[in-house]
Image (cartoon, helix red, strand yellow):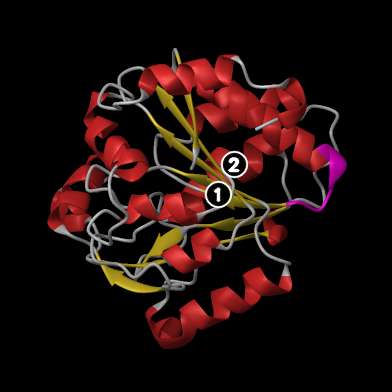
Amino acid sequence: MAEIVIVPSPAAAGVLVADEIVTLVTTRPDAVLGLATGSTPLPVYEALRPRLQGVDVSQVRGFALDEYVGIDPNHPESYRSVITKEVVEPLGLDPARIHTPNGALATISHAGEDYEREIAAAGGVDLQILGIGTSGHIGFNEPGSSFSSRTRVKTLIQQTREDNARFFDSIDDVPMHCITQGLGTILSARHLFLLAFGEGKARAVAGAVEGPVTSSLPGSAIQLHPHVTVVVDEAAASQLKNADYYRYAFANKPDWQGL
């Protein structure tokens, strides 16, 4: 099962995950990071800034989870722009080594296969950062997604478009389609970090961690992975039946085990 870590705040979660990333990059300078966008991973990227000072990140590689289809890469809400603004520039990463799926309409028919080849050529993802949507989606794998799915085009459900409308002028400006790493792609990463904060994510977290493994809740796919760390604040943990056990297990975990 996944290791569940309940922290007092998103900032505390950011520190926890950032420390693990720094350890990884220090021991493997060409580490491959799986990068998520949205508000959830921001505490991680913020905590990384001071911790990576003096650390050679010139060889670090990264792959974003997803991108909108048909959006100009220079649009401020394209995930290429977001990754550049929130991750690449603040952390001093080499932009040529950070990849996002290609959402251009001209090449969309084979963009998923192209991205899969890029990830494979890099040796796979060492550490994947994930959030979870209120519908239980990870990446843009909406309910009904196959657990063996690879990078492909998906149609966004209305709830996800409404959730993302806050980043656009209106919901009408939110693209209808995206290209996303599949659940199978995500499960191929060597270590998954799933983060969730706030009461609005509590139901999705409980379903992903303690509910049945079902395509109706794509986040439950993490139960199939051998190395998953779920980091949540108290509000997001509020519907976990075994929260006391998770606190006890983490408090008494041997230091040598790491995360």
> Whole-percent x and y of residue 251?
57, 14
Q: Which residue is at 60% across, 57% downward?
A: 189
> Whole-percent x and y of residue 259?
65, 33
Q: Nearer the viewer, residue 81 or 183?
A: 183
Magenta stretch prevailing secondary structure: loop
Q: Is residue 108 magenta?
A: no
Above or below residue 223? Residue 19 is above
Q: Is residue 99 visible?
A: yes
Q: Nearer the viewer, mark 1 or mark 2?
A: 1
Give the magenta part as a residue range.
26-31
Number of numbered discs overlaid on the protein picture: 2
Mark 2 residue crowding within 10 angstroms, few (<14) / some (14–19) / many (20+):
many
Above or below residue 16? Residue 22 is below
Q: Amino acid at mark 2?
A: Val
Q: Nearer the viewer, residue 176 or 233?
A: 233
Q: Secondary structure at mark 1?
A: strand
Mark 1 residue crowding within 10 angstroms, few (<14) / some (14–19) / many (20+):
many
| For marks 1 and 2 on the same chain, the one whose residue lies earlier in the sequence | 1
Q: Amino acid at mark 1?
A: Leu
Please state if 219 lies on the left or on the right of 82 as rendered.
left
- Mark seen at residue 35: 1
Q: Which residue is at 67% across, 64% downward?
A: 124
Q: Secondary structure at mark 2?
A: helix
Asked if marks 1 and 2 touch (Cβ < 8 Å), the reply is: yes
Q: Which residue is mark 2?
A: 87
> Whole-percent x and y of residue 89?
64, 41
